[in-house]
Amino acid sequence: MSSNVLDSKDYLAFFNEIKKDIQTSRVKALLAVNKELLLLYWRIGNEILKRKREQGWGSEVVKALAQDLKHTFPEMKGFGERNLVYMQTFASSYPDYEFTQALPAQITWYHNQTILDKVKLHQERQWYIEKTLENGWSRNVLVMHIEAKSHLKLGKAQTNFLSTLPNPTSDLAQQLMKSEYNFEFLGLADDVHEKVIEKGLIDHIRAFLLELGKGFAFMGSQYRVELAGEEFFIDLLMYHVKLKCYVVIELKAGNFKPEYVGKLGFYTTAIDHEVKDASDNPTIGLLLCQSANHIMVDYCLKDTKKPMGVAEYTTGLPDQYKDLLPTPEQFQHLINTLETKEDK
């Protein structure tokens, strides 16, 4: 074979196609092995439970079974006494074998153990399994969402998406927005100035994007837009790859105020006309404030033609640390001092 063929675009394209096929097949094989293993665990757990009910087996049988299985299959892990107890919990929590095949068996055993330990209600367990599958959450990210009670927040933001966006974009956009965002990774007091929060979010951009959810890409902070000879600066500009639209995020310390909606609508219009490509969907606005009166928000969004939502955020700093931080006035003085130095 000549070197010209090996260097050709056709060969490189062929190689990349084969490589992708191998990688895809490997992933499918791993998923199939994982599914079979979890269904095996379910069957073992179910059989133990059955004999406990019918023959009065006790914990000493489980202990003996763990030892015998480890002796018979020394090369296989997962047959310890503790894991056999988890198998029983797994089988009793999901008594429907078909349901187990369809959902719990699609995620790893470690994900399942985490959900069994931390989530008690069946409906909530199902929600976290489905979201893990949809978003590819690692075990650590799953724990973060469980501890943040994301099942109560995701898709619960106050928005006007149903009246301002076409289906199915409106439903998808609604599902992606939380009613509350947790910025406790910033380690800031609740009453800190929004510029400090914004800087903290940029410094912790990976944690911020994880909290926002899958699909958000960071486009810039204090994003500059020039209109009619004047400059305007948007707190945070994102792009959502699944929604195929820009997302304008404005941060406000303190309570929600109706005038914030007008400013956010102005920014979304500016992005639509100055930045958005013809193939992009309409820009969405997301206002994040520390607290919001739901009736007031509903009135403000009801007749607004621009798609936007309002959600709350918390910084989550424990009370015992708040006295160690500067006051909002001291933070503002520091910001003003830094801005004056930059201007010079």
Image: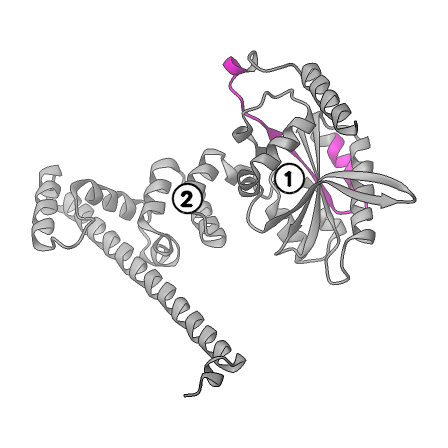
Amino acid type assigned to the residue bearing label 1 in the image: Ala
The outermost residue toward the right is 228
Residue matched to label 2: 125
- The answer to whether 257 is drawn above or below residue 211 in the figure is above
Q: Answer whether residue 114 is magenta in the image.
A: no
Task: Count neighbours of disc 1 (C-alpha within 10 A) and say few if under 14, some if 14 to 19, many if 20 or more.
Answer: many
State the residue at coordinates (33%, 49%). 94
Q: Which residue is mark 1?
A: 157
Mark 2: which amino acid? Arg
In the rendered image, residue 69, in percent from the top left (x then y), is placed at 11, 51
- Residue 249 showing in the rendered view: yes
Earlier in the chain: of badge 2 and badge 1, it is 2
What is the x, y in percent for residue 66? 12, 45
> Residue 17: which disc?
none
Label 1 element class:
loop
272 in relation to 18, above or below: above
Q: How far is disc 2 from disc 1 in space, using C-alphas?
A: 22 Å
- Frontmost residue, 188 versus 64: 188
Tell whether label 1 touches label 2 (CB within 8 Å).
Answer: no
Q: Is residue 11 left or right of residue 289?
A: left
What's the residue at 49%, 76% (across, down)? 12
Q: Which residues are magenta?
A: 296-321
> Quick one: 123 or 225, which is closer to the camera?
225
Residue 176 lies left or right of residue 246; in this view the side is: left
Q: Residues within 10 Å of mark 2 (few under 14, many from 20)?
A: some
